[in-house]
Amino acid sequence: MLKKVYIETYGCQMNVADSEVVVSILSDSGYELTENIKEAGLILINTCSIRDNAEQRIWGRLKAISHLKKKNNDLKVGIIGCMAERLKEKLIETDQLVDIVVGPDSYRELPNLVTEAESGHKGVNVLLSREETYADISPVRMDKNGITSFVSIMRGCNNMCAYCVVPYVRGAERSRDRESVIKEARELFQKGYREVTLLGQNVDSYAWNNNEKILRFPELLEQVALIDPLLRVRFSTSHPKDISDELLYTIAGNKNICRHIHLPAQSGSSRILKLMNREYDREWYMDRINAIHRIIPDCSLSTDMITGFCTETEEDHKESLSLMDWTGFDFAYMFKYSERPGTKAARKLKDDVPESVKSSRLSEMIALQNRLSIKSKKNDIGMIFEVLIEGFSKRSVEYFSGRTTQNKVVVFPVGDYKKGDNVQVLIEKCTAATLIGRSVNVKVC
């Protein structure tokens, strides 16, 4: 009889991809994935440490599932991922609730660590690696739609942004070999998937040495796109200091590479960017935005913004707002600065912006982005976009939901289509989050 594992994933797309690797490893050791936490013999929580509130959610979740442990003495609970790496000792001491603590580079050891936990000992491995990419492991897909999926192309990060804990919990940067990336993407297409997102903390620094030459990200991206014209290709995340014209021309030259770039600015103030150790300034960022508009005119843009970073003044904040307004981001992820222990900012800078000021500035930033998002969507009314159907709308089975190549959500009447079809849709109206339209011709495929 197969043992059952239940896994919850928090945080970024990298964690989603990691959870699929974990399930694959455990499947080879006699485990079966379940969506019912009550029937699981092993519960794993894949964690995020990027902000304090992310970790607080995990502590709350552990408390919430503690009753399951009381009812079943054989149940094992594991914390895996970034929080496991950062808080090993604290997790081990958590009132006997946590049996297994595994960092992002030690997932191959999970079966052995579970066995160790079953023998009454804590199963712990948080060693970081300079080689591990899990390239040989075929992930077990956990997505629901069977149309879109993630392919990890690299692990770790060499950028030492002052506020960021990622290099400390995910280790140094290393790239996955080209053949395994292309093989995984091709297999997904053959299984019916019609969109893959290539993942890395900084995809622009992808570099794989095949003993003949170093393969860079633009070449890898194009090779994945050449698998089939019907396979859409996305990527995340680019770094402003590294995104090149070569990459932009690669996107422009391949119709099935999506016209959307996520380019985290973090701040619009050159002074704050220097304190953040982002290695570019406001002018450089604006130059990259201009290059995107010049080379890929139909490209949409999104970003990450942090408000209330150490020493941030009202003038710095206004510069962030003006950069957002000038760029006209289609959407953005915006956060208050959260000091992370062990980072350069925590060691060298004072978290001196009052929480009330952080909150006020964040509210102002969100209000601006809401206006920009509405403007972006209103500009699409009357235009025709090719939409990849991902499933039914959340509100009605009479409508399909999908995304444009610019990563905007579109809903339209079901008609004679199915998941995975590409449909030409005329946009007739919009909400703050969604474009609404109708199909205007026969399905593309």
Image (cartoon, rainbow, N blue to C red):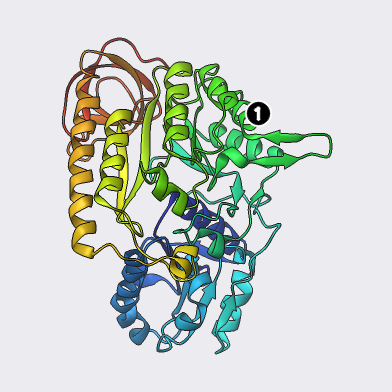
Judge whether residue 224 can be spotted in this image.
yes
Decide if residue 236 is on the left or right side of residue 325: right
Residue 425 figure quarter: top left
Judge whether residue 412 can be spotted in this image.
no
Q: Amino acid at mark 1?
A: Glu
Residue 413 figure quarter: top left
* Rendering coords of residue 8 (x, y %): 40, 62
Q: Badge 1: how crowded within 10 Å, few (<14), some, or many (20+)?
A: some
User: How many labels, in total?
Assistant: 1
Front position in the image: 377 or 256: 377
- At 57% from the left and 57% from the top, the residue drawn is 24
Q: Which residue is mark 1?
A: 219
- At 18% from the left and 33% from the top, the residue drawn is 371
Q: Is the C terminus in the top left, top right, bottom left or bottom right quadrant?
A: top left
Element assignment for label 1: helix
* Rendering coords of residue 419 (x, y %): 36, 30
Q: Is residue 262 above or below residue 27?
A: above
Q: Is residue 314 above or below residue 5?
A: above
Decide if residue 400 is on the left or right side of residue 94: left
Decide if residue 21 is on the left or right side of residue 429: right
Residue located farthest toward the right when viewing the structure as drawn:
212
Front position in the image: 175 or 334: 334
Q: Is residue 392 above or below residue 159?
A: above
* Rendering coords of residue 312 (x, y %): 32, 54
* Rendering coords of residue 142 (x, y %): 45, 51
Front position in the image: 402 or 238: 238
- At 61% from the left and 29% from the top, the residue drawn is 218
Front position in the image: 225 or 315: 315
